Amino acid sequence: MARYFQPEIETASHEQIRAWQDERLVKQIRHVWDNVSYYRQKMEEKGVTPDDIHGVADLHKLPFLTKDDLREAYPYGLLGKPLGECVRIHSTSGTTGKRVVAFYTQNDIDLWDDCCARALVAAGADNEDVCHIAYGFGLFTGGAGLNGGSHKVGCLTIPMSSGNTDRQLQFMADLGSSILCCTPSYAAYLAEAIEEQGLKDQIHLKAGIFGAEAWSENMRRDIEEKLGIKAYDIYGLTEISGPGVAFECEAQSGMHINEDHFIAEIIDPETGEVLPEGSKGELVFTCVTKEAFPMIRYRTKDICVLTREKCPCGRTHVKMSKPMGRSDDMLIIRGVNVFPSQIETVLLQQGYSPNYQIIVDRINHTDTLEVLVEMNADMFSDSLAKISAAEKELILALKSMLGLSATVKLVAPKSITRSEGKAVRIIDKRKI
Amino acid sequence: MNIHQISVFLENRTGQLAEITRLLADNGIDLRAISIAETTDYGIVRLIVDDSAKASSILLQHGTILSMTPVWVAEVPDRPASLAELLETLAAKHVDVEYMYSLFTHKDGFAYMVLRIPDDTMLEDALKDTGLKLVGHEELGIQ
Ligand SMILES: [Zn+2]
């Protein structure tokens, strides 16, 4: 079994990777200057021209792009190729305002598929595998990205899309699915369904690639144990291409960014200043090979850390940590920064299900935080005293993790809406 | 001689208890006792039924969270002060009762109390020579 999909690229020396980036960046900035008037105007406002860009060292001179720019430039303002050369769009669900639409040429799709194929091979896939893709297909990039990657690896690809759990399980059993690709919350849901229906002996998954939403190490262990697989994280965003911008290897200690296509920077989200390696900050990407939708210094709002420490898998591309929080998801409650992932960690440590919902409200000018937690068999007892003692312990643990008090409401199992795509974790009534 | 009690987790939502009792009724399960302990958010419904194995499997299939707990049933004379005497007797022997409730079933002159006794090692000894007795599955006609 091959260890890498593109060994000469994935294990290239740092100097080689840097040389590719330098050359491609110079070319890309020229392409954008000539073809993307929206970005050219931004460059002109900052007083920078393609002549100022000689390589990655000059990246910091360039202006940022944000989601606001994407909305403002909707639909064609950031297009880098004539529509005649574009073959597809994908689009992200925005909670407010216009959707973001990203364009792809055939070449863009080929390179994106390569990135997803690298992720699949890193998870142990080869042409003997049956790749079960339960990400949504459609405007969402999840299904299409892994589907393309799976074709490149030569897996038998099952384009299931999400939903219809019974059919998912039937195909898994009948067609021998070996690699599962979906959101981690759907993986957890499928794992429960397999357990409930007693299908564990008939399903022979070996690995899973789970992304598109935040998940904790505890949730990983839970899924790995229940499904009897190794669970790999994958990272991506529609603006940059989709899943496969970065992916986890067998070391499961951060995701290798496909640096031959994407240059990563970490910046201070307040000042925009580039931070040294190892600092925690906002992740910024520059696409150096994308033609139709060439994002330059796109601010992801994901907070993470980059590391160039040698990886035991042999890949040389920089690794990003799992995002520690998304500034979009980050809640500021009574002046304290709260990430939903912290709440999930506490719930699992205390023995509860990781399916929760956070309700933030403002009552009498004070923010309130309520956490809805599903009761499970392990935590249930015939004794009210025992249940409420465990509940008190949970409240204390939440307080020590978050640095503020929360109230807990125990609810019936499966009563929290579990969408089969992304889980609804936060209801912030302060915004309504 | 203890019997099985089924405890069920219920969210405090209108119709929840009706849903559970209807489910059991539709499956021919006969309720012998029911007791509810609640907080503002949730409750624990404790049930004694004629067929605890069947009832628990129906409830589990329904997606209900439950636990099975051994409880004791004491037969007490149906007259004033008999319950006080039972509890005094247990207290005198340091047998701690966590909760109790009555069974619908009774026979002439007697009532039945369901007792949850976390440490039941002293129970039978405590009731010896008191005229109070414990009854099991067979006498109650349940399994
Ligand atoms: Zn690695």
Image: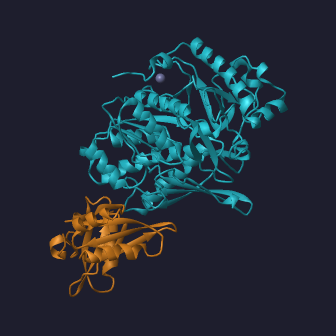
Horizontal side of residue A221 vs A18, given as left or right: left
Quadrant placement of the C terminus of chain B: bottom left
Specify the farthest residue to the left. B138
Q: Residue at x 34, y 42 (%)?
A: A227
Quarter of the image holding residue A20? top right
Quarter of the image holding residue A196? bottom left
Query: Is A426 located above or below residue B140 in the figure?
Result: above
Horizontal and vertical percent position of residue A189: 40, 50
Chain coloured orange here: B
Query: Is B73 located above or below residue A228 in the figure?
Result: below
Q: Which residue is more in the foreground, B35 or A182? A: A182
Q: Which residue is more in the foreground, B46 or A58? A: A58
The hue used for chain A is cyan
Q: Which residue is more in the foreground, A32 or A63? A: A32
Horizontal and vertical percent position of residue A410: 49, 60
Horizontal and vertical percent position of residue A219: 45, 42
Color scheme of the displayed model: by chain
Q: Residue at x 19, y 75 (%)?
A: B140
Quadrant placement of the N terminus of chain B: bottom left
Q: Residue at x 38, y 55 (%)?
A: A164
Query: Is A51 located above or below residue A395 in the figure?
Result: above
Horizontal side of residue B40 vs A412, given as left or right: right
Horizontal and vertical percent position of residue A325: 61, 40
Horizontal side of residue A92 vs A349, given as left or right: right
Can residue A403 be seen here? The reply is no
